[in-house]
Image (cartoon, rainbow, N blue to C red):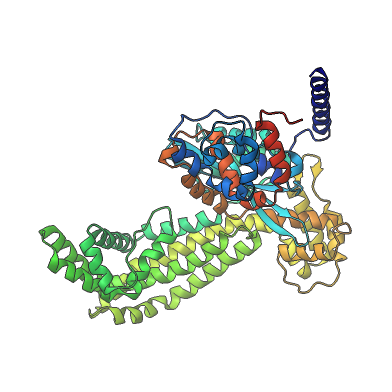
Amino acid sequence: MDEVRDRESLQQEGEERDMEEASDNNPGIPDTVEEVEMQGECQPESEAPRRPRQAVHTRKHQSYKEEITPFQAQLVSALREDTQAEDEDVLFAKTLVPTLKRLPPNKKAAVKLQIHQLLYDAEYSYLSHLEQMSVVIRTVKLEETPEIKEHFLGFLVAPESTGLGLSDLILSRLEELNIPFSDCRGQSYDNGANMKGKNKGVQARLLVKNPRALYVPCGAHTLNLVVADAAKNSIDATSFFGNVQKIYTLFSAAPQRWAILKQHVTITVKSWSETRWESRVNSIIPLRYQASGIRDALLEAREKATDAITKIEAQSLAEEVGSFRFQICTVVWHDVLSKINTVSKLLQSSTMQLDVAVNLLESTKSHLLSYRNDGFAAAQASAKDASPDEPVRDALKRLETTFFNVVVDSAIASLDDRIETLGQVKSKFGVLQNFPTLDDEALEKQCEELENTLRSGEEADIDGRELAMEIRNLPQLPTNRMTAFELLDFVHKKELTELYPNLWISLRIACTLPVTVASAERSFSKLKLIKTYLRSSMAQDRLTGLAIISINHEVGRQVSYDDVIDDFAARKSRRHRF
């Protein structure tokens, strides 16, 4: 027995030396995006109050179980002899999840972090009564083909919503993840005053720390403000959306009325929200194409209603839907919002680039300018097909002046402000697109301006003169009108990165400049799925860890579980095998 103990002791000492050597070679500083993602909140966390195990553990860790299901039998067999757990799901939840969250560095994919952009968005959680801030990092993934990637890094609890408090919170989080803020070249937030303020906002305070972290306002929130401004500047526009909401409320208040509506239409009416701009166009579509059916449903609901208030409201809404004025408002709003909604969806793509985004906004402005000239006449023609009323010329002229012109003009003016803001950032990198049309003097001037933009003190990312020389010596391009990402892809495929280092760095920065915070917005949808009312007491560390693995599931699927299983069994098994 003494020999067995000595042999076991020597084996344990050898394993400890191997672990120390591995720790010295890899001190645990995450050098990769995926490393940061998979580590997330890997520190020991305080457990939430215990709940019935079948109700909590099974659902809480379903996403993990889907990943590890092929190996579950092997894992359970390694632990069954030494544990008293009666349920495999409980065994899985208590033991495997912490192991997965402690993946060693050699189990993580490698994508080097040098240039990155930061995206943040905040939302109030009604379950925990905390302000949650989502952190997303945007980089260019360089493999066979360059690819823009956005990676979720976790949620932060914001104790205060001031610019100072939020900026300190962001910097401390980056320091925890060992992501140097000095490598950040862009920042994007929603358009709240505490975020975009020029003096005390988050972006202003972070620019003091790193002047090269260019601030880009969220393009999606920009379009939402365009719609909001247009809706508030006209009494007819405000009353129109009020009537749309009343129609939905009337039918959804009783199952009998909803059944009446479904007998007359194929597209049911929908509610709209102040914060979800796409809901506005979705609420208008049924009225745009099925106005007569909705009017008939309102009249039938009036006849079958038993209380006087419902009868009066249904009659009033039926008359409103059948009016020529209401139909013109429906057509105009549908035309304007459909165009804006299409652009908004394109901007929300994680691969959208700043130059393309500005071009989309400019094309939207051109469309609205053209629509202002002939849109009202086209709206009258469409409204005649849906309304039995005979239009009055004076009333039409007044409607064109007080509604149509006000809505379109306010939308154009709002777009001008947003295009100017985004255009200021785009113009700093304009030389990367318009260099085919520049002479030598203008080329050198714009390259020097770009160098100054990417300078902090005595340090600069590029040399302006060398950049101008590299651009002059570029090989024949497929076309003279290439986006920054297309040019980046060309340089990468031709293996010209070492010959054109300044151009290569400039293109990578230009491509990773954030356009929207849509990825941060989408993370809150995952938060609501994970932290339900049954899990309202879940610890913040566990919430962040679950969200990271769920949102970045593609990275988790690339991990080899063989070594993870061995590590898992070694940690949890209390029986020594000789």
Viewer-side residue, 251 vs 344: 251
Q: Is residue 543 above or below residue 318?
A: above
What x and y, as percent, mark residue 225? 46, 55
Tell me what residue is drawn at x 84 percent, y 51 percent. Answer: 463
Quarter of the image with the C terminus is top right
What x and y, as percent, mark residue 488? 76, 62
Viewer-side residue, 185 vs 421: 185
Q: Is residue 82 above or below residue 560?
A: above
Quarter of the image with the N terminus is top right
Tell me if residue 201 can be seen.
no
Judged from this view, the residue extending furthest toward the top is: 2
Residue 317 appears left or right of 65: left
Q: Quadrant of residue 146?
A: bottom right
Viewer-side residue, 22 vs 33: 22
Residue 501 appears left or right of 126: right
Tell me what residue is drawn at x 22 percent, y 71 percent. Answer: 297
Residue 105 appears left or right of 266: right
Viewer-side residue, 387 vs 250: 250
Looking at the image, how many numbered discs can be counted on the residues? 0
What x and y, as percent, mark residue 219? 55, 56
Tell me what residue is drawn at x 87 percent, y 55 percent. Answer: 466
Q: Is residue 368 above or below residue 563?
A: below
Q: Quadrant of residue 392?
A: bottom left
Tell me if residue 47 can be seen.
yes
